[in-house]
Image (tube, grey):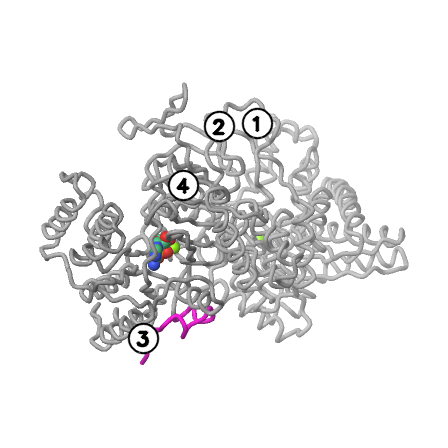
Amino acid sequence: MKQVYEFKDGGKEMVALLGGKGANLAEMAKINLPIPKGIIISTTACNEYFKNDKKLSSALEEEILTNIRVLEYETGKKFQSTKPLLVSVRSGAPVSMPGMMDTILNLGFNDYVAEKMLEITKDEKFVYTSYLRFVQMFSEIAKGIERKKFLNLKATDYKEQIIESKNIYKDECGEIFPENYKDQILIAVKSIFDSWNNERAILYRKLNNIDNNMGTAVVIQEMVFGNFNDKSGTGVLFTRNPSTGEDKIFGEVLLNAQGEDIVAGIRTPDNIELLKTSMPNIYNELTETVKRLEKHNRDMQDVEFTIEDSKLYILQTRNGKRTAEASLKIAMDLVKEGIITKEEAILKVEPASINKLLNGDFEEKYLKEATLLTKGLAASSGVAVGRIMFDAKRVKIREKTILVREETSPEDLQGMALAQGIVTLKGGATSHGAVVARGMGKCCVTGCSEIKIDEINKTMTVGKYTLKEGDFISVSGHTGEIFLGKIPLKENSFSDELKEFVSWASEVKRMGVRMNADTPEDVEQGKTFGAKGIGLCRTEHMFFKKDKIWTIREFILSDRGEEKEKALKKLHNLQKEDFLNIFKILDGDEANIRLLDPPVHEFLPKTLEDKKKMAEILSISLENIEKRIYRLKDENPMLGHRGCRLGVSYPELYRIQARAIVEAAYECAQKGIKVHPEIMIPFIMEAKELAYLRKEIEEEIESFFKEIGARVEYKLGTMIEIPRACLLADEIAEYADFFSFGTNDLTQMSMGLSRDDSVKFLDDYREKGIWEGEPFYSIDTKAVTKLVEIGVKNGKAAKPNLKIGICGEHGGDPKSIEFFEKNNFDYISCSPFRVPTAILAAAQSYL
Ligand code: ADP
Ligand code: MG
Ligand code: MG
């Protein structure tokens, strides 16, 4: 089995086998870009290595060395000869994991090679610093010797420093530093394989849902030297601005330096524009090359390059990580430039980034009065408000924290993921911190050199201000500004661009996307965001507004008979008016209206003042009110007298609500406004419940139709939100025109987790590795989805045309939406602000 490939054997479609870096290098070689020559050891070899107890098989060793011969032939150089070959040994997984794994530079050095290099270059400093870097990188990466061990070398002479470093190597790992290139290569390859399973790489995969079994490829590539002279350098660039999306090269360069320096964020590099003046020819060649690359790969590219003595080399390209803002702009621009299709653009934008766009900036009027502490580089857009934290390990899930670090290292990953925003004192816009933050869609400001951190006292000083850990700051990743205290965020904004993009997605998707909306204002909002129809109108929410609550209280607390009749009448009038207003705005789209659901206690007066007022309204004594309230109290309200249980006890309530709905619909129809009401009954657990309520409601509606001598079209269906209802969906479907899955309650009941209380303990579950994720946010794919599947299957078996929707929180969650698409749901429904995200997710899961 072939395990080692030459660049000419590969291409970008071979990512799984050759890793992203290797496959793209092969691809670039294919289109004749200036690439140092190299070979690639496949991910299969890596996986074999792990299966083989972390030993390189002799077959693999042989294959590597054979291919090294080929590389020597191709480059015209030979390891440890008079014309020495030096290489880098680079990691490269199928999915980009920036900075998570290792790379060793300048491999092949020993004293003999240094001597020969000196004869060729006549540059002592260049040769020995390169040699020294190799010894130290090799020690650190291949043997895990900490970098800081090399920080305070005694020798001042480079040659002496190399000897000293080799001695540290020997002291630390008990072996002599390998001088032979074959040993160097094989140990390096082994250590790069091992880096697939270093702690930070494992964590990164966990955070990004990357498969642990892919393994990494290894690229062995001829070195080119950015530290060769003043006409040399190294840099990283994005073909478009990764923060805003602007179509302008964005990047950084360090002259007379090796690549490591930039990526690690150790030295703050110069703007790429510097090349325009210092090496205009190279600048032109570079910009032309990367634009070609962008067209070829049909996406914004993140490119690493090196200039050796006025010659340009490309060392890596990949689709660049970017902010939500950039992601949208780039996708749309690429369509407008004719490079990609609309469908491709839809697939390029993360649904979650839409939410970020809708909620992305400080309120301007507060900015004017805010105290500006300092300004760094705007490395990743978005804004964040939170408490200062200096230690990445102590950032907690539910605290709003801004991580402030000298520089971030890959060990900080977990803390970065949990923080609201990230501030670093060192590093440029392409440093590790910046790249990772953009990938996470997290606001990040780098290079804040004016801030001084005092690790011991846990304070930071900037200008005349000294802030403690725990103090609030506000950070803008749009401008790089850092402000004192908390600044309020702007109301959500729906730009014309975003609107256009969402409309593209709308044309593509199959499922309907409705809104959960209870008021005319919600409906208005949802409509602008692209929702069609209401998937859930919670009639109880209509009572929570202003004085309306008293009407429902009056109904609940009144005695049966005349008192209740009176209260019902008021209720009816209020509801009818609400429905009329909503129907008018909807103008022909379906409206799913759920009859009263929550436990009655939620409506009861709680303060003495309110109780007195209630007594007055009903003209009974306070004592009497207290008694009635006591009688209505549930011991376990969530499973108490709520939903259709209320309807069964007080059918007149559901009757009057249904009547208000059809009356409003009729009035609209009279005015030529089309209406499609869907009356929804919550909390059904048994078909007979629904049969009974359906009969009651139909009776009421029919009597209304008789009164007016006309009919309006309506549908009557149920929520499926109790596990029992999923299992008996075929029986229930007989009495339902539609199902709407209430996945919040379904999750709550099938997992035995209260959605209001689980925040208190789910963090413990996550910390202890018992449970990942948030089941009320993203649907549980192990069991709750099974119940939904059974519900759909049984429901459709009884009634093939049954309309099926979902109205829980999961209706706005991209991962859950994929599941609903797969199960052929007719529509999803979510709160208005999540509608654009849901539309995009629906389009993506259909494509
Ligand atoms: P990472 O995946 O962490 O970016 P790389 O393998 O890309 O690691 O290596 C890091 C840096 O080392 C590169 O950006 C580049 O500047 C430098 N480098 C790697 N290989 C070579 C090479 N053959 N010649 C010159 N520089 C190299
Ligand atoms: Mg790289
Ligand atoms: Mg419910």
From the top left corner, tell me how far across and down residue 288 is, in percent: 54, 56
Q: Amino acid at mark 3?
A: Gln
Determine the quadrant in which ligand 1 lies: bottom left
Question: Which residue lies under the disc numbered 3?
Answer: 3
Q: Which mark is residue 367?
A: 1
Task: Give the amino acid type for the residue marked by disc 2 in the picture.
Answer: Phe
Helix, strand or loop at mark 4: loop
Disc 2 designates what residue?
Answer: 483
Percent coordinates x, y for residue 586 in the rendering: 77, 51
Does the residue at mark 1 contact the one at mark 2 (Cβ under 8 Å)?
A: yes
Disc 3/disc 2 C-alpha distance (Å): 54 Å
Determine whether, in the image, residue 835 is placed left or right of residue 180.
Answer: right
In the rendered image, residue 7 lying in the magenta stretch gets the answer yes
- Which sits earlier in the primary sequence, circle 4 or circle 3? 3
Q: Is residue 59 above or below residue 22?
A: below
Q: Earlier in the sequence, mark 3 or mark 2?
A: 3
Which contiguous range is marked in magenta? 1-17
Question: In which quadrant of the rendered image does the N terminus lie?
Answer: bottom left
